[in-house]
Every structure is written in C-alpha cells, then in structure tokens.
Amino acid sequence: MNLKTIAKLAGVSTATVSNVINGNFHKVSEETRRKVEKIIKESNYKPNVMARSLAKKESHLIGVVVPYLGKDEDFFTNPYNAHIIAALERYVRQHDYYIMLRCVGYPGEIIPLLSSWNVDGAFFLGVYKEEVKEIRERIEIPMVFIDTYAPGEPIVNIGIEDYRGGYLSAKYLIGKGHKKLALVAPKINGEGVIKERQQGFIDACNESKIKFNPNSDIYTCDSIYSRAVEVGQDLVFSNNGYTAVATMSDIVAYGVIEGLSQCGIRVPFDMSVVGFDNLPDCDVMTPKLTSVAQDFVWKAEKAGEYLFRMIGGEKDLVADIRQPIRVCERHSVRNLLD
C-alpha cells in the first residue's frame, strides 16, 4: 500500500492524501478526510516518517544533553540522570517525538552535533552559567535547561529549591538532636545546584548555633558510589565524633552507608545518614534511606511543556521555575532526643 493506491481507492489526488496524513485538514473536506483515514486504517498503512519530516521541515527529534561526564562515566553512574532521562523520554514519546541522547564532558562539544542532527529542540541537564551563554549564542533552536543557575540569561530553566533542600537536610538532623554533623558533597565549580545546597546546609547550622566548619566538616565526593564508600571510611577514621552525615545525592548516601558498615558502624544506631533525590532504591535498601525528595515526573513534564510551547512558536519564553521539596522520612536517622 502506498500513497497512489490510497488516492485511487479514495478517488482523490495524492496531494489530498498527503494533506490528510500531514494534518492539513483545512485543505480537504470533512467527508474526504474521513474516507482517506478509513482506508489508511483498514490497510494498516504506515506513513514514511522521514518523508513527513522533510515535508513539514520537522525532524520530531528532541536532543537530551548530559554534560560534565568523565571519560569512564556514563549517565547510569548517577541514577538521578537515568530517572530524569526516563521521565523526559516518556513525556516526549507521548507527543509523538523521539529522544536523541548525548553524554559529553563539556557542553560546547554538543553544538556542532545538534546542528547536524537537525533536532526540533533540546534539553540540557545541569549546565553552568558560562556554558549557557555560549550555547545560546551558537544554537538557534528551542531549548530548556534543567537544574541550571544562570541569572541574567533569558532562558527557560526548570529545577528545584536547592537551597531549601540543603537547609531542610541540616534542620531535620538538628531536630533529631544531632549536633556534630558532616556533609558529603561534590566540589563547587561555580554557580549551581551544589553551591545552593551547601549554602542552605551551612546557614541552617549557623541559625541553630551548631558548630560546623566548612573547611573540615565537608567531605568532597563526586556522585560516584565507589568514591562514596571511601568517604564513609574516612568519616570513621576522622575521629571527629560525627553522629550524622548529610549527602547531596542518594548514590553517595548508599556508598557512605557501605563504607561505614565496612568499619563496623551501624546506620542509624551509630551514625545517621540523609540522602538527596529520593530515588526508588531508598525504599529497598537496608536501612531504608531518609532523603530530601524531588519529583522527577513533575520536573520532566514542566520542562517538556515549555519546550513544546517554544517549538509551537512561543520562542521568547523566559522562566525559572523551582519545585518545592521536602524530607521523606524513613529509617536511616536516629532520634537522639528519645
């Protein structure tokens, strides 16, 4: 079955059939549209996607860019990436579009690729302000940034209240009677998610008159499980008397708990641990992990909504939307006040 055969069966021109397939219903009568659609359905005809894309000057491809990955990393290294990508793919698929995923070390690497892919739009995950400006200047496609801090740049960004997340993490532990806290977090490389979370944590400690020294009580660790295991061991051998540790991602919390366990430290009886992201694995590990929770689906749907508005013609949209977050309490924090 092809366009000519359908046109012959319907008694119309191939141009009319093409208009029906491409949704140009204003060019055909209601009766003709129904007749053509009936033949297409009964014959199980599948239009050539590439041909339709060329005709409409649309690729139906959406790029997803995951930056700052090392040569030995992939997006599964941090499960957060896998969950947000899955949520984005689901939203895009529901709109009859397709995802093209690219992991890069430096966001600028993706610029020539996006041009050659001829994508209709793109999502960028966690880009620093300096790279945002370069991307905007060199790529003229609809784009939405996720978890990005770029004040002054006219972009659409969807994120969470990161400062609040760090603040709540400390306040939660302090409210359970913990006064000697450690924080495990990646190195700060500029304005962004980690800086906001760290500052929230520090401010909460200062507000509650809890002694916390950023120079000695923050343990640097990328979002890599094996490195977090080592940090868990370091916490024990520091002999600083910590009763609780907060982390900036769940994958790091998992590693820290394993490192503590290898040194005979029981969570939460000997030391308490709080994660960040509230990944599904928090419910299946032992002990179940208390974590600062964000909603991946909400974030993906909000980002998708704005991107498709831009693809639909609203090219000058500017927004910085932050999702309110909370602490999801489970079993990894001991209440010292009981």
Image (tube, rainbow, N blue to C red):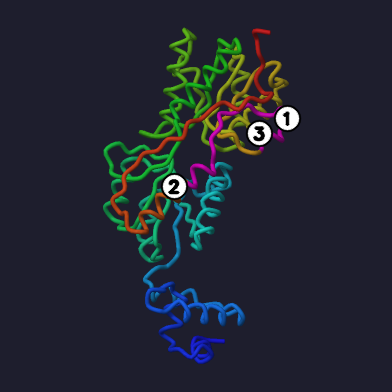
**Disc 3 and disc 2: Cα gap in Å?**
25 Å
Magenta stretch: give its range.
Answer: 281-301
* Amino acid on which the number 1 mark rests in the picture: Thr
Q: Which one is in front in this view, the residue at disc 1 or the one at disc 3?
A: 3
10 Å neighbourhood of mark 3: few (<14), some, or many (≥20)? many
Q: Give the amino acid type for the residue marked by disc 3 in the picture.
A: Cys
- Quarter of the image for the N terminus: give it: bottom right
Q: Can you say whether 51 is above or below 190 in the image?
A: below
Q: Which residue bears the numbered disc 3?
A: 282
229 w.r.t. 154: above or below = above
Question: Given the image, on which type of amino acid does mark 2 rest?
Answer: Ala
The image shows residue 60, relative to residue 294, as above or below, that is below
Identify the element where label 1 is drawn: loop
The residue where tag 1 is placed is: 286
The earlier-in-sequence mark between 3 and 2 is 3
Marks 3 and 2 close (CB-CB < 8 Å): no
Instruction: State whether residue 60 is above or below residue 292.
Output: below
Residue 335 x, y percent position in the rendering? 66, 13
- Residue 303 shows which numbered tag? 2
